[in-house]
Amino acid sequence: MTFTESIYHQLTDLIHISTDEFSIEWLGQSRSYYSSNKARGIEASNTALVKLMNKLTEHKAALERNAKHPFLLENAKRYEVLAKLGGQEIANRSIKSN
């Protein structure tokens, strides 16, 4: 399982999204981007991961602003963890390329 697949599955535990929505709204790419990458066994680009991190951070902030319930605050933390994983993946790629 690729890093991107892992993030997608963890995200779908938080919110119901299709692969098309993940590609367009979360990765900032074409409708079939994620499905195509998955079929070929390749990772999302760094640009797509940055878009994903930003979207995850937006959702975390929205939950923290508007939620008092512990369940929603816990979900905000889960978004934060996923965003940090994206940052680590980009950093790891940078280290490997140098």
Image: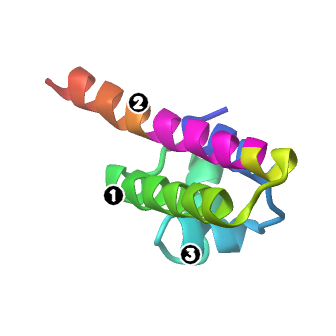
Residue 90 visible: yes
Q: What stretch of residues is rendered in magenta? A: 74-86
In this figure, which residue is indicated by the disc labeled 1?
47
On the question of residue 9 being in view, the answer is no
Instruction: Report x, y in % for residue 35.
Output: 65, 61
Q: Amino acid at mark 3?
A: Ile
Residue at image x 34%, y 49%? 46
User: For residue 88, which numbered disc appears in the image?
Assistant: 2
* Residue 31 relative to residue 12: left or right: left
Q: Disc 1 to disc 2, how far (Cα)?
A: 14 Å
Residue 91, image x and y in percent?
A: 30, 30
Q: Under tag 1, what secondary structure?
A: helix
What type is the residue that disc 2 sits on?
Gln
User: On the image, numbered disc 3 is attached to which residue?
Assistant: 24
Neighbour class for label 1 at 10 Å: few (<14), some, many (≥20)?
few
Q: Position of residue 68 (x, y in %)?
A: 78, 55
In front of the other: label 1 or label 2?
2
